[in-house]
Image (tube, grey):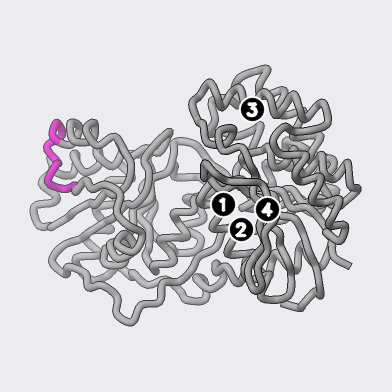
Amino acid sequence: MVDKKNARFLWISPFGPLVTIRIKEISRRLFEKGINPIILTHKLQKKEISKFTTEDNKLQYIHFQNHLFFNKNSKSFKFLRESMLKIAFFLGGMPFLYPDVKSFLKKNKDIDFIYATGPLYFTHMLGYLLKRKFRCKLVVEYTDPWSFNPYSKQSKRGISRKINYIIEKKILKSADIVVSLSDFLNSNLKTNFEFIKSKPVIAIEDGLTLQELKEFPKKDDKKIVITYAGKIYGRRNIYPLFKLVSDLNKEHFFDDFNLLFKIYGSYPKELFEKILHKLKIRNFFYLGGFVPRSEILEEIMKCNLALHIGENLDYPTTAFKVWEYLGCRKKILFLNLDNSYRSNFIRKNNLGVVIPIDDLEKSKEIFRDLLLNIRNNRFDFSINEKVLKSFSWDSRAEKFYQSIITKLVK
């Protein structure tokens, strides 16, 4: 990475924990090479005040005020908040956000460009307004699709989708560069907004940090352990796995196996308990709660495979959980549609095994073969180190530099 002396840009960040990791990992590497990201975000603290803070050898932050406006997350309040921001956007300003940032930019005229990451998509709207006011360059980054999000019920609502589309189109026309987490999401954006084909449209995926331990936790050689860590919500569909295990159990396939699925995190535990007891497969599942990050990393590293649960739709980005698993050097057992972006990503890079939730007979055959190969020492648990390093945050920061900094900073 070549140093661009005194380059500064304003990174408008939402405050989801996973996006925060992405921004910090990339920003820290840019900072070490002489680039100065100034991160505009919000600390979820009641006594937070809006101010610009800077310390030597540390990343710089501007913190939003108004904890109530951002912290309250009931459905009715979220709808009211989004409606207020959209109305304010069309009027040329954004309450609780725009005045503070506008004041900062008036005092800091050496900002090279604005980088807005969404969702939450008020970040894109704020970036658009600031570009229009200060005639600065704008990069719009998607970590999820917006008005054409296949996961969101809201995307099917007529008026809401039309308003989102109008705003999104306006912002994309203003953007100098468009960034997303995958080439597949970029192709979706180009399909829905054909005019962006004339702009630089870049994929900078999330990255991973390889866990370096002097001694990795030992596996239980007498047991096959498959571990899941995280939330099971929305359309993440674990029920095909229950059905798969139930059918194979009825066929007495597991008589010669000591198999255990470990589930940690947030999920409807009581419902899962009822289903597992009804299917008579409760003994194959350990249902745990949330555990500290250090402990869950240890659990992942001592399992045979990490479990990832996908949706019954073709989502256009790779879940952050995948990078966490790969950072532990674990291959993945992935429940998802057989032919999807995420499934093909796992297969293409030899990162694990896909269990197709849309084909039970095929999934039973794949799972049988997998367990037999593990028992007979024919399954390769290793992942190519070159592949893992190509997914590192270092490589993502380098791509950010080459694709964005060198294009926008003179």
Q: Position of residue 5 (x, y in %)?
A: 81, 75
Alpha-carbon span between mark 4 and mark 2:
14 Å
Could one spot residue 123 in this view of the protein?
yes
Residue on which disc 3 sits: 82
Identify the residue shown where x is 79% and y is 51%.
Answer: 104
Secondary structure state at the residue bearing disc 3: helix
What's the CA distance linking mark 2 and mark 3?
24 Å
Q: What residue is disc 1 on?
A: 19
Q: Quadrant of the C terminus?
A: bottom right
Q: Earlier in the sequence, mark 1 or mark 4?
A: 1
Residue that mark 4 sits on: 62
Of the image marks 3 and 4, the number of the one nearer the N terminus:
4
Residue 23: which disc?
A: 2
Q: Earlier in the sequence, mark 4 or mark 2?
A: 2
Q: Is residue 390 above or below residue 76?
A: below
User: How packed is label 4: few (under 14 Cα within 10 Å), some, or many (20 or more)?
Assistant: many
Q: Is residue 348 above or below residue 380?
A: above
